[in-house]
Image: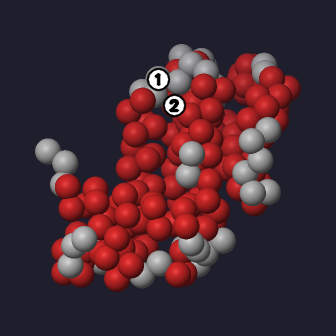
Amino acid sequence: MPNFTKQAIKTSFWRLLNEQPLNKITVRSIVEDCGINRNSFYYHYQDIPALIEEIFMEAADALVQKYPRIDSLEECVDTAFRFMLARKKAILHIFHSVSRDVYEQYLMRCCDYIITTYCDTVFGGSPMREEDRTLMLRFLKWELFGASLDWVGRNMPENALQEIHRMLSLFDGLHEELIRRSMEA
């Protein structure tokens, strides 16, 4: 059963974050917006960064639940980017705040899951050396993470999904080539 107070806090936080920078949001403004007292906020969260962390980890978990297998990087990346685009102002406010590290942790967790699950789904049975597989996963995760940070840093232009799709099409077949090279080494 969902905790309605926690949900009210999160809803108020998102609403406020869409209206103003993170450094302008206080526990007081959150509790006034959702009509609870300060003690109720602190019963559920230590502080605002703890609230942000829970929100982003829940979003990462939702991505995992939606895609237990990833046959298409494009579809999964689309889902993650659309989640962020729907919250563009809020994401940009967090990105440009002192709590940027929480966003980056969320993003890295999503990138790690997307790449690892995709490679396990598509190439799980391939005879690649384990150290090469680890390097390939790390490289692909960094690529997705870097592209995502670059996108947010450019104020999240909507045409970025087209760029990502083009990049993925340019890299089509790279994974198979890496597996082939690993087997030859």
- Check contact, mark 1 vs mark 2: CB within 8 A: yes
- Name of the residue lying farthest toward the left: 1
Q: Disc 1 to disc 2, how far (Cα)? A: 6 Å
Residue highlighted by disc 2: 117
- Label for residue 132? none
Q: Residue at x 51, y 66 (%)?
A: 17
Residue type marked 2 = Thr
Q: Is residue 63 visible?
A: yes
Task: Tell me: residue 30, above or below residue 83.
Answer: below
Q: Secondary structure at mark 2?
A: helix
Q: Name the quarter where the C terminus is drawn.
A: top right
Describe residue 56's horizontal placement relative to residue 124 as left or right. Answer: left
Describe residue 65's horizontal placement relative to residue 121 as left or right. Answer: left
Foreground pick, 49 / 64: 49
Q: Residue at x 66, y 26 (%)?
A: 74
Q: x, y percentage for residue 85? A: 62, 46
Q: x, y percentage for residue 109? A: 51, 50
Q: Residue at x 76, y 29 (%)?
A: 165
Q: Residue at x 42, y 29 (%)?
A: 66
Residue highlighted by disc 1: 69
Q: Secondary structure at mark 1?
A: loop
Foreground pick, 22 / 12: 12
Task: Tell me: residue 19, above or below residue 86.
Answer: below
Task: Tell me: residue 85, above or below residue 169.
Answer: below
